[in-house]
Image: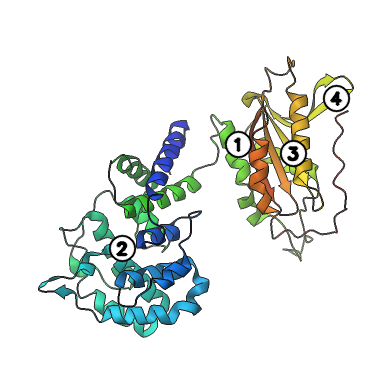
Amino acid sequence: MVSINTTSKLLINDVYSLLTRKIQTIEPNSLEGIFAAWMLEDLKLPDENKLIADFSVMNYRDVAKLALWIELAPETLSKYSNLLEEGLQRVSGRTDTLMGQPAPFSNDALALLALAIGARRLGGDILIEISKWLIKFVNPSNENLSQWKRLFLFATLRLIAQPTEKHGPIILDNLSDLELALNTKYENLFDEIDLDTVYQTIITRSLEPQIDPEIAICQMAALTYIAKKLPAISLTKPTIEQVVSLLNNIPSGFKRWPWEEKAKTTTSTAQKWDIQNEYHVQSLVYFLLAPIFPDIEQEFSMEQLGQLNARADIGIPSLNVIIEIKFLRQNTPFTKMLEEVAADASLYFKKDGVYLNKYNKMLVLLWDNSRRNQEHREFIKAACQLLNIEAAVVLSRPGNMPIQKREHTEDYQSKPNS
C-alpha cells in the first residue's frame, strides 16, 4: 500500500492539478474527450446531440466514439444499438492495408480499444466479426509503436477474449499507471499491479513536458483510485485536512450500518440505528475521532459573553479546532443553519478570547436529513467564507435509512447558548 504522509498528499494534489489542466484542453466531443468522460468522474459530458448529428457509419472514429458514449451512458444502448451495430459491421469489413501500407486505423490504439469495447457490449455475431477482424492486424509486439499504444492493443485483445501468447513476451516498462486505470473499468485485465509502483510512475511521468492525452487521462483515473485507497487519516500525526477527509468519507461506512427489517440471528432483535437529531450525529463523530485523539472534548463551555454561555460540540485541542454539528430537517432552510454557524463562530472566537490559544479554528458538519443535495455546495461555500471556519462537510441521510416518523414542522430545539 502507498505510504501516506504530508509530502505524499501535497504531491498528489500537485499532480492532480497538473493533470487536470492537461485534460481540460481536450475537446469534449473528440474520441479522447469521450474516453476521458468515461474514465473519469465530474467531467463535462460530451454533447449527445452533436455526437449523433456528426456521426457517420463510414468513419471508424465516429463508431469508436459511439461505443464509448454507450459505456458512459448505458441507458442510451437501446436507442443507439442498431447504429453501433451497423457501424461495427462496416468497420469489420475494412481492409487493414492501404496501397501496401498499414491502414491509418491499424495503429489507432484508442479507437481499436473502443471498437472492442463496443463489440463486447453488443456481443453475439458482431463480437465474433470484430474479433476476427482485429486479430488479423492488432499486434502489441510492434516495437515501432509507443508503449502506451502497445498496451492498449494488448488490452484490446484481452477484451475480446483473444490469446496474446502468439505475439511472444511483450516487455512494457513503467505502464502500471495505465494498467491500473484500465483495470478500474475491467477487473483483472492486468494482473499483479503494485500501487507503490503506480504512484511513483505517475509522479515521475507527470513531470514530462509533453504527454499524450490518453496517458494523462489514465494517470488521472489511476491517481483517483489510489487516493480512494489511501487511509483517510494518519494515526501518528493527523491533520485537520485528514479529519475533513475522514468526515467526508462517513457515507462509505453506512454500507454496514444496521437497518434491519428482521433479526439477523435467533438470539437477537431487529435493529435500526436511526439518527434522529444533532446529538446522535455528535455521538457518531465522537465515536470515530475519540480513538484517534485522546485529548478530544465534548459538550464543553467556552468563555461567557455577557448573559451568553457558549457551549461547543466537540473539540480537539491538539489541532486547535472545534467541530460544530448541525442537523437540518425537512422544513428548515439552509439559511437558518448558516445563521447558527455564524453565531457560533462569533461566540467561540471573540476578540481577545481566553481560549484562542486552545481553539482558533472551526469545522462545520451538517447532517442533511432532507437530502437536499443540490444546496450543499452553496452552503459549504458560504460557511467557509466566515471567519475562523476551516472547512464545512455536509452529509445526506443515507438512502437505506428511511425516516421512521413524520418530522415535526419546526426544527430541533437547539442547545441553549445562553
| 1 and 2 marks in contact (CB < 8 Å) | no
Task: Read off the residue under disc 2.
Answer: 110
Gap in Å between the C-alphas at discs 1 and 3?
21 Å
Q: Is residue 400 above or below residue 161?
A: above
Gap in Å between the C-alphas at discs 4 and 2?
64 Å
Q: Of callouts 1 and 3, which one flags the residue occurring earlier in the amino acid sequence?
A: 1
Q: What amino acid type is highlighted by mark number 4?
A: Asn
Q: Residue at x 28, y 78 (%)?
A: 91
| 1 and 4 marks in contact (CB < 8 Å) | no
Task: Read off the residue under disc 3.
Answer: 338
Task: Read off the residue under disc 1.
Answer: 243
Q: Is residue 282 left or right of residue 83?
A: right
Gap in Å between the C-alphas at discs 3 and 4?
20 Å
Q: Residue at x 87, y 19 (%)?
A: 306
Q: Quadrant of the C terminus?
A: top right
Q: Is residue 29 left or right of residue 132?
A: right
Residue 70, percent across and down? 45, 70
